[in-house]
Amino acid sequence: MTRTALYTGSFDPVTNGHLDVLRQACSVADRIVIAIGIHSSKAPVFPAEERAKMLRAVCGPILEARGVALDVVTFNDLAVDAARRHGATLIVRGLRDGTDFDYEIQMASMNATMAPEVQTLFFPASPAVRPITATLVRQIAGMGGDVSAFVPGLVAERLKAKFRRP
């Protein structure tokens, strides 16, 4: 039986913190579905299709090396509905600090009520990636800063091109 995990987020952009969670999730899943949340109230830097391409490019080799299958999809409904749709019995989430924990435990509890068959697993961020957020990466890149320590090389290149100053 294949053990499928769902990893949700905006991934705008994918960061080294996201990769840290994925590496850890490989120990509990045979297949990981990365689900890009699409919300009309948000204006992303990268369109969903481009985020999906970047995720496949940077995450694919990591999961393949660990014998874990990868799917990248979009969703615009509840995470538990996306989990059911893709056959996931696990939702994986990363925790950087107590603020993340407070929010994520509430969400996990609500999800457990709506879908008791879907379990949420938390992975603590490794110390090197703990301060990284996609929001901060976007802000640094938007101001012309070097984000290469926070994102995979391909993503750093795409951000630099996106925010290139004349």
Image: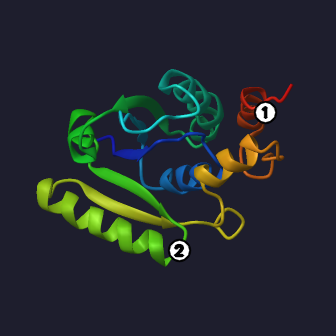
Coordinates of residue 46 in the picture (x, y in percent): 57, 29
Q: Which residue is mark 2?
A: 97
Residue at (60%, 40%) from the top-left corner?
13
17 versus 166 height, above or below: below
Q: Is residue 69 left or right of residue 66?
A: left
Question: Contact, CB < 8 Å: mark 1 with mark 2?
Answer: no
Rate crowding at label 1 as few (under 14), some (14 to 19) or many (20 or more) other CA atoms within 10 Å: some
Label 2: which secondary element: loop
**Amino acid type at mark 1:** Lys
Dot 2 amino acid type: Asp
Left-right relation of 101 to 125? left
> Which residue is rendered at x = 37% and y = 45% of the image?
6
Q: Nearer the viewer, residue 71 or 1?
A: 71
Q: Quadrant of residue 42?
A: top left
- Locate residue 23, reporting x and y percent: 58, 52
Residue 159, placed above or below residue 91:
above
Q: Position of residue 57 (x, y in %)?
A: 64, 28
Q: On the image, numbered disc 1 is attached to which residue?
A: 160
Asked which quadrant contains residue 93, the reply is bottom left
